[in-house]
Amino acid sequence: MTRLRLRPESGFAVPFANRAPDRLRLAAALLLTLVVAACGRGQQHGGFGGFPPAPVTLSEVKTVTVPLRFEYVGQTAGSKEAEVRARVQGILEKRAYQEGGRVAAGQVLFVIDPKPYAVMVAQNEASLAQAEAEHAQAKRNLERLRALISENAISRREFDDAVSAEESSSAGVKLAQAKVAESRLNLGYTTVNAPVAGFASRAMKSEGSLVSPGQDSLLTTISQIDPLYINFSISEAEKLRIDRLTAQGKLVAPDGKKGQEIGLRLSDGSTFPRKGKLAFIDSRINPDTGSFDARATIANADSALRPGQFVRVLVEGNTRPNAILVPQRAVLEGPKGKVVYIAEKAPDGKDIAVQRPVEAGDWVSIEGENQWIIEAGLKPGDKVVVDGVAKVSLAPPGVPVPIMVGPPPGAGGDPSKGGAPDPSKGEVKKGDPAKQ
């Protein structure tokens, strides 16, 4: 049997030979139909992108007075830092204190070999005795010649020589007395006593070392730690900002008579149980650090703090009146800065959320919840979206988003149900809480 193979001539279209374009056109038509249907459903339900209105909770903006607590890095120091130095040269024979322990004022710390200085005292005392004997002889000669000069039995020159000899011997006695005093003083310096009470650091020289006055004379250091100093610095920018807020009435300092309290946070994160007082803030900028030096004092009778510890200084007592607070979770980072969503009414009466840019300042931690202090962009009475911001933020910027308003946090006044924190228990922070 012969098989025939048909070949289409040029221009002859075989049915269904090229169906791919038809399929693409059909798929596009179906997709367009689905999009139109989805848009119709979205408009029917009043949501964005076909979703129902986002459930949110709102917080009404109010002005409150917030306590501000500024935080700085500081280091403790003794209220008296006494350097114990060798004042005479000699061999260090003994260290008479416990390194790192408490010492009393006048307590013996070191003993330098006293024997050479004891010999010097004996020599100078002998010289003094000799000078006193010579002076006594000169005085007796002067008394004899004084009687003779009244009778013109001797020349005036002889009498003047006797007067000069008596005066010279008197000066010799004073010089010998000074040398005795000096030698006794040096002998006393061989016993090194504590100038103040406090805690003594390690000994810089060991027994048997040669010590001498001068640059290398330091033996140890004593720190008086009750009261204790806390030294810290305030940057120039921070000081200018505080002064500006004070001038604008946005920062109220405590009564000057009471002083400004400070708290301490230790390196392990714990809070020191006692409060201190701000002693001073320098009026000049330290050229070495470019900041203002400041100092606080705190009672330390139990020696709980030691010199050299790094702490965080919490300057308390300032308040921020008429502050607008917004929970940190309600503030988003937009392309041009921070934004919040405000609840408004659409022309048809439905609830919508509108994006609004804000200027955020410091943030405060109130009862464990971070809240921004809003400097500009909000006013009392505005209703800020607090919960549900993530769903609302899916909309493009400037597009109102339908929302479904739920009960505000803490409805019924029960703080356990998410009510607003008490602003009187705030702690001011600086910067972005997400970066803390």
Image: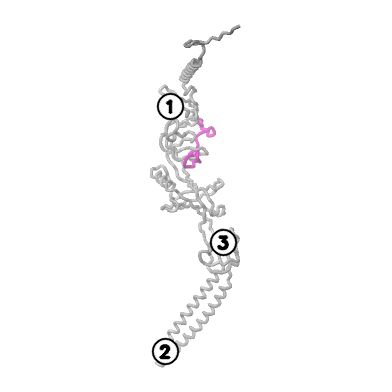
Label 3 sits on a secondary structure element that is: loop
> Which residue in the structure is indicated by mark 1?
399
Give the percent coordinates (x, y) of residue 210: 57, 67
Tell me which amino acid carries mark 1: Val
Task: State the residue lying farthest toward the left.
Answer: 247
Front in this rendered view, residue 68 or 113: 113
State how far apart marks 3 and 2 are (Cα).
62 Å
Residue drawn at (41%, 42%), measured in percent from left and top? 250
Let me know if residue 422 is in the magenta part: yes
Q: Earlier in the sequence, mark 1 or mark 2?
A: 2
Residue located beneath label 3 in the image: 204
Label 1 residue SS: loop
Q: Nearer the viewer, mark 1 or mark 2?
A: 1
* Residue 26 picture location, percent across and down: 49, 15
Locate residue 63, reporting x and y percent.
Answer: 43, 36
Crowding at dot 2, Cα within 10 Å, few <14 / some 14-19 / many 20+, comes out as few
Q: Which residue is mark 2?
A: 158
Query: Where 355 sits versus 280, above or below?
Result: above
Instruction: Name the amino acid, label 3.
Output: Met
- For the magenta stretch, what is the residue range? 409-436
The residue furthest front is 2
